[in-house]
Amino acid sequence: MANRLDFIIFGATGFTGQYTVEELIHLSEEKPATWGVAGRNKSKLDDLLKKIGTKLGKDLSSIEVIVADVDDAKALEAMAARAKVVINCCGPYRHWGEQVVKACIASGAHHVDVSGEPQYMDRMQLEHHDAALQKGVYIVSACGFDSIPDDLGLVFLQKQFKGDLNSVESYIDGEIEKPHTPSGALLHYGTYESAVYGIAHKHELGALRRKLFPTRLPQMMPPLKPRGLLFKSEVLNKWCMPFLGSDKSVMQRSQRFFYESEKKRPVQIQTYIGFPSLLTAIGALFFGAIFAVMCQFSCGRSLLLKYPKFFSAGCASHEGPSEETMKKTLFSVTLVGEGWEEHVAEATDAHDGPPSKRMKVIVKGRNPGYGATCTCLVLAAFAILKESDKMPAQGGVYPPGAAFAKTSLISDLNKHGVTFEVIA
């Protein structure tokens, strides 16, 4: 890999891709790296570098520009052959992700992305883990807000807990920093589009997971029961409901990895999301129900994708959030773990009494969708580049918790605005 660039950002002209380029420039001042950008339109890539160069006061004229289209396998392989790590920002990944993964494996490049699509992630592990392992390549998805705060938050909690952790409840929360009044949407269309297709194809997950994991994990006791559809949480002091994103799925894959490879007790997981008022929560339930039903039909999906602002109650648009709104958006992920101070001999052994120890961890940051996400993504790429000797085996397809548990990624995130802290 001596003559390769450290990183290539594929899909650099997309909404997430642009902010990933900016984040890489910022982090490269502290962590020198060689990098390039790739996409299907050279003139747009050139314009992007000029725009970002002007914005940040940087001369980017020497940055390598590579033309590669997701429909051209040879071009993708040539692009991947120029990189040590491909940072893939081209979604929805269920449509465009596998082509890039296959090109990276063929060309011997590592791969990170910000997918929040469980079907895509599970299928990549099922179909490409062995090839990636044989080639010595790491393929790691969910390296953004989905799902590093939750997955590495649980890794952090397990390390701090020191006893046997039985269960964790995760609570995602967000707010707009006052006195700012948000203008425009909170999400870009690309994120919304991925959610539409993810829910539409949720029925595929059962059969896919039975192939990926033919044996069930042992049942831990006592079982962690899910809370209701809508409940008042003492953790956030807010109304909450189950979080339907990919975090729980990603965390469970990491827990299975730790059980199978390190004989660690698999932690039971439930994920929730908080709302500022009961009225807001009821509104989210109402829109969510309509959204979920419409996703099941092609005509419904067409309407959802044609009128994103209307069907998301103004939360998503083709323009995305303004830079001011992004800077003022705060997030937290609170993980509440319960277990025992002492260890049992085997991971599957039962404890004599009910859980007697509780610990609370909070992961906080700013601009979850396009700030913290890009920080997580780029630092994950640096972790592979610099610390692959601390990662599992010599390659393969992994969730971020399993991939980065023994690296310094949590420490690096703490230094760059995504903080992990024990609060109780």
Image (cartoon, rainbow, N blue to C red):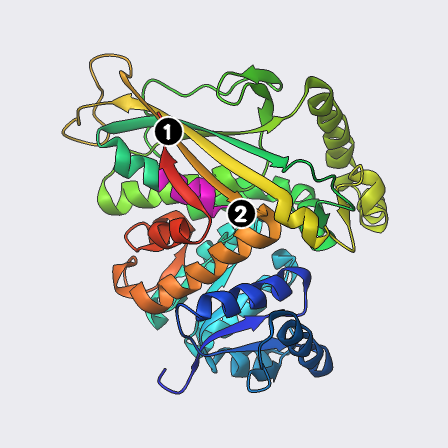
Rendering quarter of residue 244: top right
Percent of width and height locating residue 213: 41, 44
Apparent side of residue 182 relative to residue 368 in the rendered image (left or right): right
Which residues, given as a range, are shown in magenta? 145-155
Q: Which SS class for mark 2?
A: loop
> Is residue 416 at all visible to an observer of this figure?
yes
Q: Where is residue 278 in the image (x, y as percent from the top left)?
A: 69, 18
Give the crowd class for mark 1: few <14, some 14-19, many >=20 residues within 10 Å: few
Q: Distance between the residues labelled 1 and 2?
A: 21 Å
* 184 in relation to 408, above or below: above
| Tag 1 and tag 2, C-beta contact below 8 Å | no
Residue type, numbered disc 1: Ile
Q: What residue is shown at x 46% (from left), y 19% (from top)?
A: 225
Q: Which of marks 1 and 2 is nearer the N terminus?
A: 2
Q: Which of 73 and 277 is in front in this view?
A: 277
- Which residue lies under the disc numbered 1? 423
